[in-house]
Amino acid sequence: MTVTMTPTSVVSLPDDPFTLENISNPYPLHEKLREAGPVVWLEKHGCYAVTRYEWVYEILTDFESYCSSGGLGPKDIRKEAEWRPPSILESDPPTHTVMRRGLAGVISPSTMRRLREQFAPFAEELAEEVAGRGEVDGIVDIAERYPLKVFPDAVGLRPDGRENLLPYGSMVFNAFGADNDIRAAAFEEGERVAAWIMDSCERENLTTTGLGADIWKVADEGRIEPQQATLLVRALLSAGVDTTIFGIGNTLYNLARHPEQWEKLKAKPQLAKFAVDEALRLESPFQMFHRTSTVDTEIGGVHIPADSKVLLFMGAANRDPRKWGEDADVFDLDRNASGHVAFGMGLHQCVGQPIARAEIELMLQALIKRVDRIEPTGEATPWIHNVLRGFARMPLRLVPKA
């Protein structure tokens, strides 16, 4: 391992987290970066990398020293425009506060009770179908089909054009990583896809009973501006599909490879929510994004100048043995995984996470009722993505209950 020290005493490494090798299997690099120090300078990308749980948590919860308005990607969008108007993800108080309150009022406990009732029938229908088939692709047949049906319906999206949702999510999240061939491929039809998304977020193109219409009602009440309503609907569509697909897929991936944990879950189906959290911790769908330092500051004794880009590795923090113990790399339903940062933390913790959790749990509970064993029948194929961790294909055998 080549390690050099810069004048500011931060460990400087030539490693690139955005190579195909490191994207396909990020965990060896995560361990190397964690053990190199609380902060590492990534020479290729000219940014600081933070991988230990303590410091990732610290930065996520200190929005004054590490802002979001600089963008979640490698550019400082306060100085250089990005490809789309900034969303709630790329905002700080007071703008963020207004938009967050508007969205939090829409995704309320009563909303979640209604959505669970709305989501449950298709989970049961899909589980019945795939359990009867036996041989399935865990991604194409389950992880993609379920959220791509229930979530756009919940938002109130028109039926035509929904095939644009995944390409749009790919653009949004790949832009949080390096400006490389992966990002370029995601943007091949960027202009057309982005135009469809923005058009779909307009009030007249949404049903009158979905979450999108509820957001527009907040604008009617004067609590947010009309243009903020468009951006909040867009934020829902950006964050509510890809990460949920990966969440379902990664949960299936772990349960298929740990049959003793599936047995535990069958015996106690009420553990489903713990299985979801443990899978989110171990195989975090959202692996990394950037923050921007607003002042001269310090992380673990390392000086960070103002206006620096800091790349946060949530996937590495969620496997940090300093937080999770020496068995941090093990999938264990008995572990208390609360406090993981798969949904972020602090001001920007994912406001839509109750929806994602409900979708993953309902799909899992429907499978528990019908499936005796989940067996991998081949290697899962990683989904090559700059910042999301998941699989494109996952051959499985679902052995139905007698």
Image (cartoon, rainbow, N blue to C red):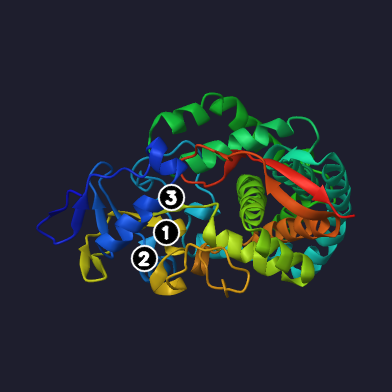
Query: Label 1 amino acid?
Result: Ala
- Regarding residue 99, the answer to whether it shows in the image is no
**Of all residues shown, which one is farthest toward the left?**
7
Which of the labelled discs sits on residue 72, or is there none? 3
Identity, as a three-letter code, of the amino acid under mark 2: Arg
Tell me the element at label 2: loop
Dot 2 or dot 3: first in sequence order is: 2
For marks 1 and 3 on the same chain, the one whose residue lies earlier in the sequence: 3
Q: Nearer the viewer, residue 284 or 71?
A: 284
Mark seen at residue 52: 2
Residue 240 placement (x, y as % from top left): 65, 50
Side of 164 relative to 47 (left or right): right
Q: Which residue is mark 1?
A: 316
Q: Position of residue 71 (x, y in %)?
A: 42, 49
Q: Secondary structure at mark 3?
A: loop
Q: CA distance from mark 1 to mark 3?
A: 17 Å
Q: Disc 3 marks which amino acid?
A: Leu
- Residue that appears at 54% across and 28% down: 190
- The answer to whether marks 1 and 2 mark residues whose Cβ atoms lie closer than 8 Å is yes
Of the two numbered discs 2 and 3 in the rendering, the one whose residue sits closer to the viewer: 2
Which corner quadrant of the image does residue 169 belong to?
top right
Q: Is residue 273 left or right of residue 129?
A: left
Q: Residue at x 22, y 60 (%)?
A: 305
Relative to 64, 240 lies left or right = right
For the question of whether residue 370 can be seen, the reply is: yes
Q: CA distance from mark 1 to mark 2?
A: 7 Å
Looking at the rendered structure, the secondary structure element under dot 1 is helix
Front residue of this view, candidates 396 and 250: 396
Q: Position of residue 290 (x, y in %)?
A: 39, 52
Q: Work out whether residue 329 or residue 208 is closer to the camera in this orientation and state it.
A: 329
